[in-house]
Amino acid sequence: MPRLSADARHTVRFILNGREVKGQASPRTLLSDFLRHQIGATGTHVGCEHGVCGACTVDVDGMLTRACMTLAVQVEGCAVRTVEGLAPAPDRLSVLQAAFRRHHALQCGFCTAGILMSLDVFLKAVPDPDEEAVRDLLSGHLCRCTGYTPIVRAALEAAAELREVQGETTHA
Amino acid sequence: MLDMPQDKAGEWVGRAIERVEDAALLSGGGRYLDDLGVKPGTLHMAILRAPHAHADIVSIDPAAAKALPGVAAVLTGADVAKLTTSLVVGVKAPVECWPMAVDRVRFVGEPVALVVAEDRYVAEDALDLIEVAYEMRPAVVDPLAAMEDGAPLLHHGFPRNIASDRSFRYGDPEAEFAQAAHRIAISVRYPRNSCTPIETYGLVAEYDPHEDAYDVLANFQGPFSIHAVISRALKVPGNRLRLRTPRDSGGSFGIKQGIFPYIVLGAVAARVAGRPVKWIEDRLEHLMASVSATNRATTLTAAVTPEGRITALDWDQVEDCGAHLRAPEPATLYRMHGNLTGAYDIKNLAVRNRVVVTNKCPTGLNRGFGGPQVYLALERLMQRIAVELRLDPLEVIRRNLIPADAFPYRTASGALLDSGDYQKTLEVGLEAGRLDELLARRDKARAAGRIYGIGYAAAVEPSVSNMGYIATVLTPAERRKAGPKNGAQATATVAIDPVGSVSVHVASVPQGQGHRTVLSQVVADVLGLQPSDIRVNAEMDTAKDAWSIASGNYASRFAAAVAGAAKMAADRIAARLACVAAAQLNVPAEDVMFAGGKIAARSNPANAVPFSRVAALSHWAPAQLPEGVAPTIRETVFWTPPELAAADEGDHINSSLCHGFIFDYCGIEIDRDTGEIRIDHYVTAHDCGTILHPGMVDGQIRGGFAHALGASLLEEYAYGEDGSFLTGTFADYLVPTAMEVPEPVIVHTETPSPFTPLGAKGVGEGNCMSTPACLANAVADALGITDVRLPLVPSGVAALIHGAEPPAPAGARAKPAPAPTGKGERLMRGGGRARVGAAPEAVWAMLLDPDTLAAIIPGAHDVRKVSDTKFTADVTLGIGPVKGRYKAQVSLSDLDPPKAVTLSGKVDGNLGFGGGSGRITLAPEGGGGTELSYTYEAFVGGKVASVGGRLLDGAAKVIIGQFFAALARKASSGKGTKSGLVSRLLARLSSLLGRDAR
């Protein structure tokens, strides 16, 4: 493990949503602050800075990670995915994002980025979840606007749609 | 969820279209405050907060903080006071209210000093270097105890801590109580809680010394009456305080009204630093010291006929507004003043309202705002009446509901209930939610020995507050002196640009509710366009936009007032466009219609011109406008309903414009072993007038329900008796997750309001009012109890079933710890053993040596020996998310060299305080080693105590373990055996014990 000087800033390089990025970070700089204020990827939000609310959840090398509990220097060389990387094109939405919009699964939208990341990773691992499993996953996130039901519905509908797409691809 | 109503096909209003806001929010393209760039050179603010609930500030030494590289300024309360005036206080009393403590702190978390520095990390570093000395005062946290003789006094201007004490009388309550067949009463406590938006407070402030003007961007939500409070505090006229809001806000639910004292701090900091200042509140600050709903102690008594008909009510409400009466308080207490008879036809009313201050966070807006407090008492009373008179609770509700033919109905205290058919909504709700099946389920569960209960609640949901209701706290004479206050100015602007495209601007400051989408529907309907043709901007800028004191996002005023104002603005422009088009179409203006992007003759739709062509005419060829027709470029409407008059001499007040109706019922089951409550079935029937967007209405209901569920079952801002704040993280202040929130059955009826342009009423707060009462009634029914305390956490419910848990048996413990200063601190006990590879004599010497102690105490720096048995130390330690510096004072006693010693000490820091003692014994072990065993007992208070017992216990164990591990290493390495080391170690240990070994 490299030793980093506490007083110095270090160059951190990693893959963000498929593109290499780099920036300068002190060893104590949080990944959440680094993404938002150094890289400019402000879609990842900070809600509690103690790992409970889940708003800052990102995907680091396929692992769901609280960006507020991770140091920027820890993602050196990693592949990081954030909400900015979900849509297939700037003017389109992914299947999951579109389901959120149809079901009014967001109101203020502040917690949404973390929830989308969790569901995105979860649905890849569990393509056919039941409601209980979705609720269990969502229990790692706090949403104060929606009462959660529309999020659950959107997730289940997106899962079904993704299975259909997957099935077509497989059978083709 | 409602589907698109068929009868409204062709109209956009009433359809659950997708929100225009969502694509950006779903893609990381939000524009929340902290997403917006700042000017180069912007500084960052951090705030030092009081660890004590009540203490005099003896001294503040900012020198070390100021000397830290990167720090631009450090301000204390005195510095802030020099550049400002006190915030206004909502009652007539000689009391000041500063945004930062001056001389004295009155709640845990009160700002004591602020730092502005080049970045937030440095600013927070500097906080640790500010040295504050406090002289503790006794604290009071219970509102009833605060009024007692000898209670600690918070403000000299509030004798007995009472800020206001008013009594009201409507009808002839005394006569009704004198002749009543039954007199039935209930006492309830509504707890402190908050809707805790996931985005915290944030602001960027700037000062222009040349024009003596402030420019502040903040995620403030209104009401903009607060703008006047801020500019007054900053000693500038309103036109020199430009207050702006970003496009997106991460939720508010009332809470972001409470940012205003921080706007004052940020503005002053920017002025002193000479550069823009940014501040983003962190979650710990938010939970501890942003704002809270009021907690309230209520005794409510009814005069009741043998049939269960209520003839009079007597309210005794004691409202706890926390340490300062900040604007607009005591509004929480008066928001419901016209609605104290709820959904019932009760003509006689007596009210005593007292407002008290206690050593807790000041209160402010929070979803429901006064409604939860009122309905918990009123609807619990309805259930008690049923129990005491052996009636069906549903029947008691039915017998008292306001008759459907009585609207508009004037309540005893003056509210004018606009419309409704409460009986119909109730029956539709019963049918749709299948009460009969629920009753059968209860019978079956009970027959099987399970604990099951059913609860009901009926509530009138007020919306669009009368800005004059707050003045009801004043006497009529005081009101005459203060000048008239009434109304609820709403504003909207519709504008057409040179290519004929339509923009809308409102001052509704949405916090996630989708205002932009709904307004595009409303205006599209008027102008015959698609919602996607309309661009809505809801950002707010007091320097440029139309606004008034009632602007903002509160009191559920959007659908009823703001959307209505937008319709009126669109109607006015449409009327003029019709005249312009009529001239071109050669038809009378009355024959002109707007449809499909065209303006056409109703009698001959083929005779049409494109909307944009007519719309642009005022820009390109104003001379072509028909005579007498004003340009169609921009129309701003200000609308205030005439029904919202000021309070009269008899203290009658129409506190709100619209009144929705809610009827809720539910079945709950309680786990006999754990006390956990499971909501089996929840039905909520609403009449919120005309529904503008069914998806959003149901979203508001679900969201309000989830908040209410949290308030009922989980959430409380808990304080120790000494005022220590005990729920300072989201691991301690538990809010519902997807696992706890069931989907309620939502039922709608629609009785349009005759007083609003679109017939709509507010809907966002109703379940916060009805649901806590409904769940409490179900628990009362399940357990057959009278006194139901919220939140109904499993341990509390289990105690109701099994009796309170006996205290833990007294076990082996250390020598008594220094007595805690109050009963609210967290107490910790523990002990352990360690093996050290040195003889007891060597270990003993290490424990008495400052240098060795400094080397092995986790986080220690600067250990000083005061005498042979007294040491001081500075220690930096992190517990969970809370890291801070502490000053420790340690003394050694009962020295029995080299066998045993007792360490006792106390620690104090900006994040908390504590004390404790530990007994260490050393015993020789084979091979020249020592077995060291220890026991300790300690207490912790302040912010550190709020991070949660599990964290503290764990942290204590880890830190003490680190200490002994380091001791063992040091001893084994043969170094540091000089005399005094042990004492140093002990000092360190003691400081650890005192502070961390909670």
Image: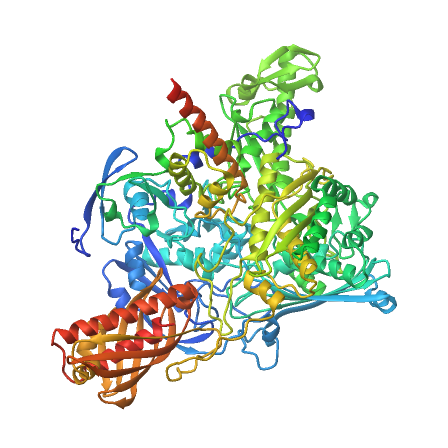
Task: Please name the residue shown 80% across and 52% down the image.
Answer: B395
Residue lying at the far left of the rendered structure: B974
Identify which residue, B792 or B34, lies in the foreground: B792
| Residue at position x 39%, y 19% in the image | A171
B166 to the left or right of A32? right
- Decide which of A48, B577 is in the foreground and name it: A48
The image's colour scheme reads: rainbow
Work out whether residue B810 can be spotted. yes
Q: Image quarter for residue B102?
A: bottom left
Residue at 51 percent across and 33 percent down: it is B536
Q: Quadrant of residue B187?
A: bottom right
| Image location of residue B557, percent across then percent down | 62, 44
Q: Is residue B882 left or right of residue A73?
A: right
Residue A141 lies, in percent from the top left, at: 44, 47
A25 or B824, which is in the foreground?
B824
Q: Does residue B10 appear to the left or right of B240 in the view shown? A: right
Question: Could you tell me if residue B29 is visible in this image?
Answer: no
Which image quarter is the C terminus of chain B in?
bottom left
Quarter of image, res B377: bottom right
